[in-house]
Amino acid sequence: AVICIQHIYKLSGDVVKLWASAFGGEIKSIASKYSGSQLLQKKYKEYEKSVRIEEIDGAKLVKNVAQNMEEIFRKKAEATRRLVEAAEEAHLQHEENPDLQYEYFNAVLINEVDEDGNSVELGGEFLLEPNDHFNNLSVNLSLSVVQVPTNMYNKDPDIVNGVYWSEALNKIFVDNFKRDPTLIWQYFGSAKGFFRQYPGVKWHPDEHGVIAFDCRNRKWYIQAATSPKDVVILVDVSGSMKGLRLTIARQTVASILDTLGDDDFFNIIAYNQEIHYVEPCLNGTLVQADSPNKDHFKEHLDKLFAKGIGLLGNALTEAFTILNEINQTGRGSSCSQAIMLITDGATEMHDDVFAKYNWPERKVRIFPYLIGRESAFADNLKWMACANKGYFSQISTLADVQENVMRYLHVMSRPKVIDHEHDTVWTEAYVDSAQLGENKGPNPMTTVAMPVFSTKNETKNQGILLGVVGTDIPIQELMKTIPKHKLGIHGYAFAITSNGYILTHPDLRPLYQEGQKRKKPSYSSVDLSEVEWEDTEDVLRTAMVNRRTGTFSMEVKRTVDKGKRVLTMHNDYYYTDIKGTPFSVCVALSRGHGKYFFKGNVSLEAGLHDLEQPDVALADEWTYCNTDEHHEHRHLTQVQAIKLYMTSRKPHLRCDRELIQQVLFDAVVTAPLEAYWTGLALNKSENSDKGVEIAFLGTRTGLSRTNLFVVPEQLTNQDFLTAEDKEGVFNADHFPLWYKRAAEQVPGTFVYSIPFSSGGENKSVVLASTAIQLLDDRKSPIVAAVGIQMKLEFFQRKFWTASRQCNALDGKCTISCDNEDIKCYLIDNNGFILVSEDTSKTNLFFGEVEGAVMNKLLLMGSFKKINLYDYQALCKEYTGSSDSAHTLLDVSTLSSLNLVFMCAAQRAQRTMMVPCDTEYPAFVSERTIKETTGNTDCGGCIRTFVIQQIPSSNLFMVVVENKCDCSSAPPVTMEPIEIIYILFINQINISHNESLKCDRLKFQKDRRRPHTIPDFKLLYSFPIF
């Protein structure tokens, strides 16, 4: 053992360095040779004198992006306005006929036949053809279909009349699509409940034969139909409400909550002889009706129990007091106000309360919902509604809930109708499960919607809302307006709403994951502060919400490679508003090479020749030419579109000429690599063991080239450089991972890694890549990155061969990594193992395998730990837990709140995944430390280790003595820790932690209210029931 220790000490300055040097030289030689990096560097250098380097003007860039997005939104709004005009004219010309018989195409019944093979009623033959523009769904581009909710009679006279006159929209749907082929779904949601959708598509009921979709419950409908509102919901929990009545009451409350949107504010009060706030900490205030808050209240509804007597007067007084205070302080919607009263009866009219708080102005509407079949006290409730400009409804069964709740929307919409305000409404981003393609992932979208009013003279003053028209705008279409080549390798663009919610951001994770719908509160409720969390003062968020134009800078930590690696950089943010919408857009540019772009010139003939080579591909989601604007260009590839644009006199194509010129330049400069790689592949003496499988390159313009050194069937990793490898290819959000990581390496060095698999299986390959710089200074743009994919076994074999070398004259080495006295590892700059004697440890984090050594490396400064936060995480929840509610923390409060971190203990067999916030670490090596020797104490046994950087790489060799049992040393893991509150038995701690929970619920971030609110006089001056 003593001899072994002496050898280990020699390793620190001699043997390990020799091994590292031998391995580094061998592996760089392979990577350089097969990638062709030196050839590509030379080729770009040849153009160094003729190219022009420009610093990117972020302010100008974001202005152009905003204008491009504004143009898209304007076109969609115009299409929607044409639908409004056509719908109102069609209704004006139609005379209601209660006996009207009309066969229409029902979305569920089309192409259905009975037992005899005949078309069912309201079905009929309806031609459907797959269309890739509509997520590969089978659609009819000539006709629309009509969907009627399952709980409604599809031949009801009101519905039949509405369907009949709205047939006039078919012509406008088709015409809109011809004018703007980028349009997707167009529709009309009727106030009667039916939904007309273009293009026509077949709807399929769920496993219970039900289609629960009701257009009137959708956010776009509610926002377009009503003004922002403050709502207090009063729920009677007196003894008479026991049983089914309380169940119906809970469902009624939940349905009311579903009709509230992000511009609304609310609270729920249960009453008997006392006042009970459903969420006790929100005493005397209102909260924004965003999805997390609504879901929080829904979870509390099951805690309502009926007992005692109901003192409605006290509850009404409390509700009026809240609404009055909110109105005076301006903390609510600053628009309409309402009290929803859910009870089984009222013995008094409480006119004294109304006289004191609501008359004569009647600013607060009263909407009573009588629960149950009895009508003994209905008269008092009807009087309350009429005396306070509301609406009375009676709900006898659970099936009656939704239709009766919807009726209040008609009343709330009347100010808009009478004022004839065709306000354009834009929704938050959302994923509509009703319109997902079978084989496609989620396509987040925003909707532009406008209300449709009755313009008939006899009903004009009654304020009749006919419905809402709308069209969807895929977020993907907005992404196409962003010039990716101008953003640099780490740059990105994002947009937010007036509420601070993300419309699009590369770090926004959708609701759907691996084919399953994630249990997230809402796609639309991810706040900007939850992804740009380093902005703890909300400076950027506040400026964007208030639609300012300006700049902001901060250091950020960006995770890559499935969140396992972190890149630290300094970002400059440039932001402005998108005119005519409630949205703001921002461009983030990373300092250094990310702020510079260069322009080179080649002949058109040479550029097109090299661009059309079979080994060339262009970034799938980048827009070189917009082929969606005209139907005749839909079939064109980007290369074909570029050729048409550059060679035709009037191609009628909108293209990015600057990007095209630069991609042609890159095609010419990179063309010699095709012959170079082909020469290597044809040389039988090279790569005889097929260790190197692929060579690849990518350029700043989204151009890529690949060369296979083995036949496709023999590739170890079949996903690399395919659409399945989302982080490994150019897409709308980012450059490839191998490109991004290479750009952060010292020029001329390679970055090596084993790809992480989402499925957990080992990819058994190593990727090596390096960046190509134009100039030898910090202001030089990164013009390209090249790399290779090699077999993991080939790579590891090179390592073991190198670790058997020594300086002994007789060639007999006294120590090598084959010795049982030592353990040898090869780890990367983030601490992940690439080589270990135990192959099961490959790609694990080093701290999980050698916790004591990793801890010492952290103490010595060889590695540093970076704490990160994930506000879109999913955590396991055990259904047996006494408190299943999760409190979400905003990062800006982390420093000031005394938080307790813990993992939930298992209390039951069954688990479910729920939204949560987590803190987790990432690790990065310190670049200035090349070699280190250290010791760890494992229970009194001293264990020596050596860490040595591999030259020209991001790798480190770690050699550890194998003489001590360090299994008792705790591992250093990257496991996320959920941020939760622990409620202790001690009453002081309970009140303290509860107050933190309340602070989170009460806390309202800056938001901008809708710019149009109906005239106050109109809100309250016309007769209602």
Image (spheres, rainbow, N blue to C red):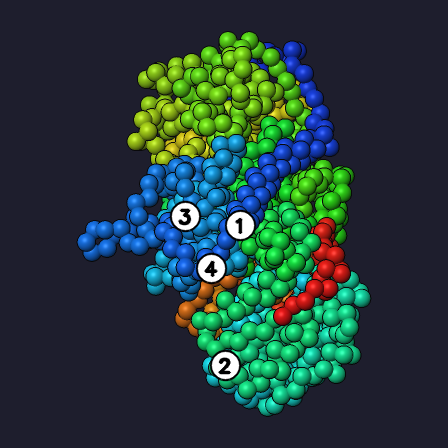
- In the depicted view, which residue is nearer to us: 417 or 209? 417
- In the depicted view, which residue is nearer to us: 346 or 430? 346
- In the depicted view, which residue is nearer to us: 184 or 4? 184
Quote the CA–CA distance across marks 1 and 2: 37 Å
CA neighbours of label 2 inside 10 A, class few (<14), some (14 to 19), many (20+): some
SS under mark 4: helix
- Read off the residue under disc 2: 372
| Disc nearer the start of the sequence (1/2) | 1
Look at label 4 and name its amino acid: Asp
Residue 91's mark?
1
Q: Is residue 657 visible?
A: yes
Query: 42 left or right of 1009?
Result: left
Q: Is residue 257 above or below residue 784?
A: below
Residue 747: image quadrant is: top right
Residue 340: image quadrant is: bottom right
Residue occupying the point 74% across, 56% down: 1015
Query: 385 left or right of 720?
Result: right
- Read off the residue under disc 4: 158
- Read off the residue under disc 3: 145
CA neighbours of label 4 inside 10 A, class few (<14), some (14 to 19), many (20+): some
Residue 785 pos. (x, y %): 54, 26
Look at label 3 and name its amino acid: Val
